[in-house]
Image: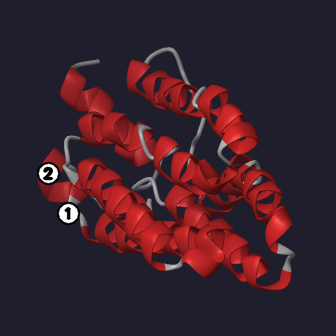
Amino acid sequence: MTFDEMRADFIIRRKGSLALPITGVLVYSAIALLSLAVDPRLHNLVLALGFWTIMPVGFLIGRLRGEDMSTPPENPLLRLSASARVMALATWAIHIPIWIHAPALFPISVGIGFALHWVIFSWTVGHPLGFVHLGMRIIFVLTAWHLCTANRMGAVCAGIALAYAISVVQLSRVDWQGRLGLSFDPRRA
């Protein structure tokens, strides 16, 4: 399989890769709403628990959408995608000490740390969208954290949800047929 064929196979199997960003909108919106009802001393716990629901919910949404999230050996880009998520998950080695020693910064580290894998996604699909998502996450997270001191975690999560929502719209508008020379739209396959 050529690199272009691997890239097309990735997009076709993932049907445009919408499941995880849709999940990000849902989960981070729910966390932001929970921040309004939960004691502020528990905000970081709510964020951590909510974060760990992303992958199972994402796989469920992916299954419902018919996205193939497997890592078949014939396409290393699918394995790279899974490895990039593991790389981002490894940032919990940073998040946990921050939670313990600088808990006010925890929403920033989680909010930006797990966006790092979007760089790999951008390279994999040959589209700048992943860099745009990372940039939005950095700007939205830092702005929310600085402006909304009364509920930083909720504001940061609302910013993350907004970045995901914008990325869902952007992903759904990419002309994968034109970019990859496909004879059909993989989102509808």
Residue at the disc numbered 1:
175
Q: How far from the left and from the top, in percent, is residue 72?
A: 54, 22
Q: For numbered disc 1, what is the local secondary structure? A: loop
Residue 179's tag is 2
Q: Is residue 16 left or right of residue 82?
A: left
Q: Is residue 181 visible?
A: no
Answer with the quarter of the image where residue 173 lies.
bottom left
Instruction: Say if mark 1 contacts mark 2, CB within 8 Å.
Output: yes
Amino acid identity at mark 2: Arg
Q: Is residue 176 left or right of residue 53?
A: left
Vertical arrangement, residue 67 with respect to residue 136, above or below: above
Q: Quadrant of residue 158?
A: bottom right
Q: Which label number is shown at residue 60?
A: none
Amino acid at pointer 1: Asp
- Residue 166 vs 106, above or below: the answer is below
- Number of callouts: 2
Colour mapping used in the image: secondary structure
Check the image and report above or below for 132 versus 12: below
Residue drawn at x 14%, y 51% is 179
Task: Give the x, y percent position of residue 56.
Answer: 76, 49
Q: Using the image as rendered, state which of residue 116 and residue 174 is in the foreground.
A: 116
Q: Residues within 10 Å of mark 1 (few under 14, many from 20)?
A: some
Residue 136: x percent and y percent? 32, 62
Residue 93: percent from left, percent from top? 65, 26
